[in-house]
């Protein structure tokens, strides 16, 4: 039985990757058109939405969104969520289809051929060991916000193996940016993505079609952001994102 399960997980991951790259390659000429000719980030975001919708449809991954936010900020904002699965990235477009955003993510993604072009021209790489490049990333953030784009940051710093559904400690980057640029923060909780596609680096870990769920929490206004210290803001966001997970899975708080 275990052999059959592992074989299915392995084959599904192969299929998922095949669809992922097939859709990306089909859209790649349009991405280039957007980068070099149209030069409108909202067009590129539209392509991301198409990519996400086709990928999720063909791999039979569906999303239920529980929206606790009565309204969203009128100005660009920081979006934060827990990060337990590769799915988190491609489900985000379904949650906020009318709010164009970009990702801040680890610079290692620049090493992937073709994907490097997309990441370099649209998203923002994070350089943790290079202060000069880190400063350049901050300037890109400011430009993106000025152009009406919100920014998605996973404050855990990546998919931390062995933590899900618990949260790994949050890093300060998202909260420093929110305070520095005086913008609101929107917390989102993914409750079961890791049960659909688990560890991305393990070929025989859980991978199957399924129904994901996201909870969109009320945003933290720019006034609230400025009224709190860094650790207080980080703790508040951690608690908000963690609460539904604790209720669902019954573990004690790991608040940092």
Image (spheres, rainbow, N blue to C red):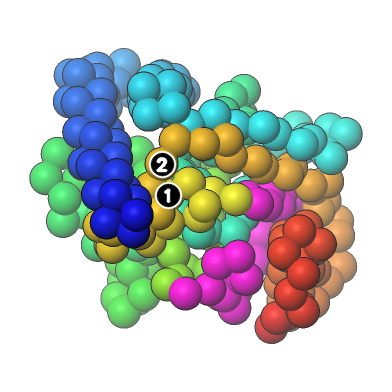
Q: Is residue 159 above or below residue 51?
A: below
Q: Residue at x 48, y 46 (%)?
A: 196
* Residue 76 in view of the camera: yes
Quadrant containing the N terminus in the rendered view: bottom left
User: Percent from the top left, x then y, of residue 113?
Assistant: 11, 45
**Residue 176 seen from this side:** no
The relative height of residue 157 versus residue 220 in the rendered view (above or below) is: below
Residue at x 57% of width, y 35% of height? 211
In the rendering, at what x and y percent does residue 142 appear? 51, 49
Tell me the magenta residue range: 162-191
2 or 1: tag closer to the N-terminus? 1
Residue 160 among magenta residues:
no
User: Residue 176 lies in magenta, yes or no?
Assistant: yes
Residue 197, numbered label:
1
Quadrant location of residue 36?
A: top left
What is the quadrant of the C terminus in the image? bottom right
Are there few (<14), some (14-19), or many (20+) residues within 10 Å of tag 1? many
Distance, label 2 to label 1, CA atoms, is 6 Å
Q: Disc 2 or disc 1, which is closer to the eye? A: 2
* Local SS, label 1: loop
Residue at image location 20% in from the left, 19% down from the top: 26
Height in image: 193 above or below 50? below
Q: Is residue 56 left or right of residue 244?
A: left
Give the x, y percent position of residue 204.
28, 58
Q: Residue at x 19, y 26 (%)?
A: 22
Q: Which mark is residue 208?
A: 2
Crowding around mark 2 (Cα neighbors within 10 Å: few <14, some 14 to 19, many 20+) is many
Q: Which mark is residue 168?
A: none
Above or below, 174 against 43 in this view is below
Q: In the rendered image, which quarter is residue 135 located in?
A: bottom left
Q: Are marks 2 and 1 in contact (CB under 8 Å)?
A: yes
Residue 149 percent coordinates (x, y): 54, 36
């Amino acid at each position: 039985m275990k052999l059959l399960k592992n074989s299915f997980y392995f084959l599904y991951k192969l299929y998922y990757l095949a669809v992922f790259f097939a859709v990306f390659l089909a859209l790649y000429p349009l991405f280039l058109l957007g980068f070099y000719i149209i030069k409108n980030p909202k067009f590129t975001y539209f392509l991301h939405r198409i990519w996400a919708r086709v990928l999720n449809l063909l791999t039979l991954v569906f999303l239920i969104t529980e929206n606790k936010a009565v309204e969203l900020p009128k100005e660009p904002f920081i979006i934060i969520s827990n990060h337990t699965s590769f799915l988190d990235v491609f489900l985000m477009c379904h949650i906020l289809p009318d709010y164009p955003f970009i990702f801040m993510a680890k610079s290692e993604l620049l090493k992937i051929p073709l994907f490097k072009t997309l990441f370099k021209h649209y998203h923002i790489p994070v350089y943790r060991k290079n202060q000069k490049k880190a400063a350049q990333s901050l300037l890109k953030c400011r430009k993106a916000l000025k152009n009406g784009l919100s920014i998605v940051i996973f404050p855990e710093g990546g998919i931390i193996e062995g933590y899900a559904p618990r949260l790994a400690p949050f890093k300060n980057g998202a909260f420093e940016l929110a305070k520095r640029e005086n913008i609101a923060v929107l917390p989102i909780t993914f409750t079961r993505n890791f049960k659909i596609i688990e560890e991305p680096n393990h070929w025989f870990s859980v991978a199957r079609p399924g129904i994901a769920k996201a909870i969109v929490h009320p945003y933290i206004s720019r006034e609230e952001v400025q009224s709190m210290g860094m650790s207080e803001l980080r703790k508040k966001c951690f608690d908000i994102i963690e609460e539904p997970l604790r209720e669902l899975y019954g573990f004690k708080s790991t608040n940092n």
